[in-house]
Amino acid sequence: MDKITVKGLKLFAYHGVNPEEKENGQSFIIDVDYYLELEKPCKTDNVEDTVSYAKAVKIIQKVFTEKSYDLIEKAAEVIAQALLSEFKEIQKVKVTVKKPEAPVKAEFDYMAVKITRKRK
């Protein structure tokens, strides 16, 4: 199976358990790998024969920012399920949601959740 990657997508949202996270929001970084057969678009060179990353990004942006979640685990799940629901060609998706501004008193690059979901 082939893979398309969206890496380092920066979005601003209001996810978190603390009141200030829900009120002020923060930046998140999202990585998505989605798996599908790419033999046809490799032959035809036609964007209609693939799941374009531009369309995938629009879905990710929409579902990640339209609601507020306590957990980034839930936000990652919403992204995965939206991509599987919207694009029947996608067989598997891996979603990483990074929270570089997590309210933790420590020096770190980011906290993150990574999930994998497959079409049933």
Image (cartoon, helix red, strand yellow):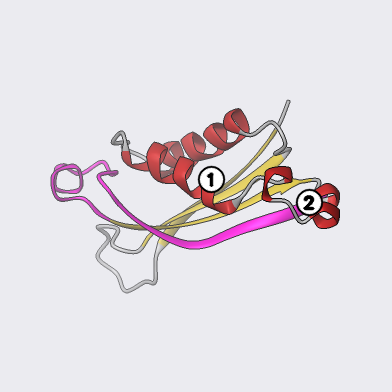
Q: Which residue is mark 2?
A: 41
Q: Nearer the viewer, residue 112 or 45?
A: 45
Q: Nearer the viewer, residue 49 or 113?
A: 49
What is the number of the mark on residue 42? Answer: none
Helix, strand, or loop for circle 2? helix
Q: Is residue 14 magenta?
A: yes
Indicate the position of residue 79 as horizontal and vertical percent values.
49, 39
Q: Which residue is mark 1?
A: 55
Contact, CB < 8 Å: mark 2 with mark 1? no
Query: Mark 1 is on which residue type?
Result: Lys
As displayed, is residue 100 above or below residue 85?
below
The residue at the point 49 percent across, 49 percent down is 57
Left-right relation of 90 to 2 = left
The residue segment tinted magenta is 1-26
Total count of labels: 2
Indicate the position of residue 119 as horizontal and vertical percent values.
71, 31
Indicate the position of residue 12 as horizontal and vertical percent values.
29, 53
Q: Residue furthest top?
A: 120
Distance, label 2 to label 1, CA atoms, is: 16 Å
Q: Quadrant of the C terminus?
A: top right
Q: Is residue 40 magenta?
A: no
Q: Characterize the local packing of mark 1: few (<14), some (14-19) or many (20 or more) Cα atoms within 10 angstroms.
A: few
Query: Mark 2 is on which residue type?
Result: Pro
Helix, strand, or loop for circle 1? helix
Left-right relation of 88 to 44 = left
Indicate the position of residue 44 as horizontal and vertical percent values.
82, 52
Q: Nearer the viewer, residue 29 or 49?
A: 49
The residue at the point 69 percent across, 31 percent down is 88
Image quarter of residue 71 = top left
Sequence order check, earlier mark of 2 and 1: 2
Left-right relation of 53 to 34 = left
